[in-house]
Image (cartoon, rainbow, N blue to C red):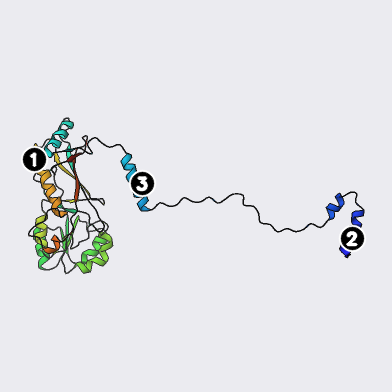
Amino acid sequence: MSLALLQLAARCRQCSGTYGLLRYAPQRQLHYTPAVLARKEKKPPVPTKKQLALKERKRAKKAKKSIYDNEKMTLSDAINVLRAVEVASPNATYELVIKTEMGKGTTIPKGRFNLPRETKAQAKDRILVFAEGRQAEEAKKAGADIVGGLELIEGIINGRHQATLFLCSRSLIRGITPKLGRVLGPRGLMPSERRGTVTDDIGGYIRRLKGTSEWKGDKEGTIRQPIAKMHFPVPDVVRNVRYFLNVVKRATGNIRDPKADKEASQKPTQAITRVLLSSRQGPSIQIADA
């Protein structure tokens, strides 16, 4: 018998009952893993863009719709309805809404127009032109406000030269792009060949701009344009609507210009899905004969 057990037996004799034996008995060391008191909560999965879009479409279907959403009227009937609603507001404005399809790689529709009868006085564009030599002289004669070469770049960056329209000759576009791309690009003012603001016929471009206004759609392809006043005669309202619709149809490729070049004729067509006419207090009425 080992010395440790003999010492234990001697100490147990001094104690009464089994309490002492249990008290001094060597306890076995057990290795165990602590119990898991609570499971970790699982985070909900992050929905994808397709799932969010599907959820938004379902929510839109459940939303209350106007009685005019599925009802179509001719243009003249829609004008008469809105005139009746706005009978106490002769200075109210008709608003034309044109919705187009926006596919992958489709550019936002935009252009310039001049209504047969304007709804308000047009704001004058302040034009800055990058040109030299003969082109600079033509730009000044056509009415450009600021004309110069690459020396204008610093003034544009620090805000000394302000303009609402920037034009550039083809020979200078490479010189201004590295420095002005980040300044004018986010504001939609950077000259580009696609928009026609990079050209060698600067004088002719400025002359064509006089008396015109710019229209532009949003990221979803929706174009909103004040088109006429309530006190306009009905034929004037119809003329304005028809004119602006043709302008948008040409810009979106729904009407082909036979004189256009081959590159322009190969551009994809942006389908026009809906045309609506509305007013401040009146409903949005879908036009059947747009």
Image location of residue 150, percent across then percent down: 21, 67
Q: Earlier in the sequence, mark 1 or mark 2?
A: 2
Residue drawn at x 31%, y 41% as measured from the top left: 61
Which residue is disc 2 drawn over?
7
Residue drawn at x 11%, y 44% as measured from the top left: 240
Left or right, 245 with respect to 101, comes to left
- Using the rendered image of the protein, determine whether residue 97 is visible from the camera's viewpoint: no
Left or right, 9 with respect to 240, comes to right
Image location of residue 269, percent across then percent down: 18, 55
- Please, what is the three-letter code of the amino acid marked with disc 2? Gln
Which residue is disc 1 drawn over?
236
Q: Secondary structure at mark 3?
A: helix
Which residue is disc 3 drawn over?
55
- Please, what is the three-letter code of the amino acid marked with disc 1? Asp
1 or 3: mark nearer the eye: 3
Q: Earlier in the sequence, mark 1 or mark 3?
A: 3
1 or 2: mark nearer the eye: 2
In three-dimensional space, the C-alpha distance between marks 3 and 2, rounded to whole angstroms, equals 79 Å
Label 1 neighbourhood size at 10 Å, few (<14), some (14-19), many (20+)? some
Q: Quadrant of residue 89?
A: top left
